[in-house]
Image (cartoon, rainbow, N blue to C red):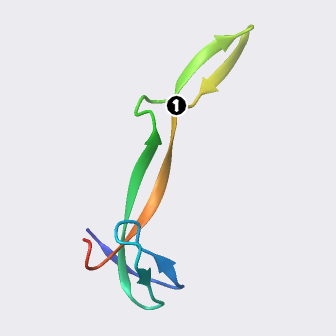
Amino acid sequence: MKMTKSRKLCKCYSCKNEIAKGDLYAKKSIRLGSSKPDSVENIKGVASIVSHGITVSTKYCAACV
């Protein structure tokens, strides 16, 4: 994974330790909710996009990568 330098204080998603300003961290996207892709459905004659989950970007410290 590509490591990025932190611009501000944040927390590691895995171990919950703090990532200090200037430390290296890795970003990874995770899917919360159902893994089904979004779908387009016809609801009362109107095309609607139905989302089954959400994708969130998380940060991991150098020790957890």
Please tell me whether residue 45 is drawn above or below residue 23 in the rendered image: above
Q: Is residue 40 left or right of residue 36?
A: right
Residue projecting furthest to the bottom: 22
Q: Could you tell me residue 54's position as x and y percent?
A: 52, 43
Label 1: state its secondary structure.
loop
Q: Could you tell me residue 57's position as x and y percent?
A: 46, 59
- Identified by mark 1, the residue type is His
Q: Quadrant of residue 63?
A: bottom left
Q: Is residue 8 left or right of residue 1?
A: right
Count neighbours of disc 1 (C-alpha within 10 A) and say few if under 14, some if 14 to 19, many if 20 or more.
Answer: few
Q: Residue at x 51, y 85 (%)?
A: 7
Q: Residue at x 41, y 66 (%)?
A: 13
Residue projecting furthest to the front: 16
Please tell me whether residue 58 is drawn above or below residue 43 in the rendered image: below
Q: Residue at x 59, y 26 (%)?
A: 50
Q: Could you tell me residue 43's position as x and y percent?
A: 69, 12
Q: Could you tell me residue 16's position as x and y percent?
A: 41, 73
Please tell me whether residue 51 is drawn above or below residue 3 in the rendered image: above
Q: Which residue is mark 1?
A: 52
Q: Residue at x 46, y 83 (%)?
A: 6
Q: Is residue 64 left or right of residue 10?
A: left
